Every structure is written in structure tokens, then in C-alpha cells.
Amino acid sequence: MPLSLSAICTTCGTQYPPSSEPPHTCVICNDERQYVHPDGQSWTTLEGLRLERTYKNEILGEEDGLYSMTTRPSFAIGQTAYMAEKVSTLKFERLYNAFHRIVRDNASQSVQKSAERYIAALEGTLFDT
Ligand SMILES: [Zn+2]
């Protein structure tokens, strides 16, 4: 693997931080709830997938303001990502099991704050690294 590329586990699809070498193991696949592929650990990179030209991302408009993105043919665990243009106001104020706690008031505000944190994490501005 060339210098400073981000390894992607071919079994689960998790991408790791840039490195000169891929990790020895995938922490996701080595979790007792997951599995390591019977042929063993293998890695690719986004650049490798692009050069391979096997996969395409299919983006569909599912409904007004909601889109899906699926890699075809299926890659890793074959997930589909859903993207909403906005989060609508909830019709209730309380959330149960929100990361193992209860949000007693202002559920919409908590969901909006969570969405903002998620977007910041995707943009790489949530954490100081
Ligand atoms: Zn993995």
C-alpha cells in the first residue's frame, strides 16, 4: 500500500486513518459480534477501488428530501446510506434509549444538536486531532 493511504477493510468496509501500512487487524471484524473473513484479513483503499472500476455508487431519490446511496455491486456489508435534506420537528418531547439515556425535554432540539455534531464529525471539525 503506498504511503499515507487510508486502508479500508474489505469485509466490513471500515476506513482507517491514513498510514504507511494497513492496521494489523480490523477492530470491527475482530469484535466478538462480527467475524473475520474465512480467507483472512484483507484491505483495499478508496484509490484502489476507483482504479479497479468495479464499483459505482447508485444515488436514488427515495422521496421528497430523502436520498439513498448504495455501492453496486455490493461491497463489504452492503450498506445503504440515507441522506435527508433536513430533520423535521418531532411530535414529542421525550426520547428513550438515546445512547442509553432519556432525553426528558426538547427532543427536537436534542436531535438537531446531534445532527450538527454528526455533520461536524463528517467534516472533521468535531474533534481536535
Ligand atoms: Zn473489518
Image (spheres, grey):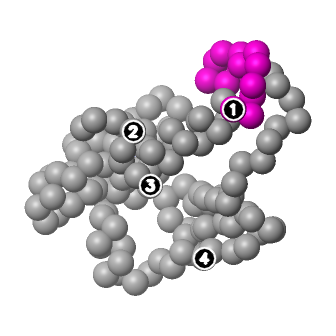
Residue 50 location, x and y as percent? 35, 78
**Residue picked out by circle 2:** 126
Q: Going from the N terminus, do you reach mark 3 or mark 1 first?
A: 3
Residue 99 location, x and y as percent? 61, 23
- Eye-nearest disc, 1 or 4: 1
Q: Amino acid at mark 3?
A: Gly
Q: Going from the N terminus, do you reach mark 2 or mark 3 first?
A: 3
**Seen in the image, is 28 located left or right of residue 22?**
right
Q: Residues within 10 Å of mark 1 (few under 14, many from 20)?
A: few
**Residue picked out by circle 3:** 13
Marks 4 and 3, how far apart in space? 17 Å
- Label number found at residue 8: none
**Seen in the image, is 3 located left or right of residue 124?**
left
Q: Residues within 10 Å of mark 2 (few under 14, many from 20)?
A: few
Confirm or deny contact between disc 2 and disc 3 (CB under 8 A). no
- Eye-nearest disc, 3 or 1: 1
Is 48 one of the magenta-colored residues? Answer: no
- Eye-nearest disc, 4 or 2: 2
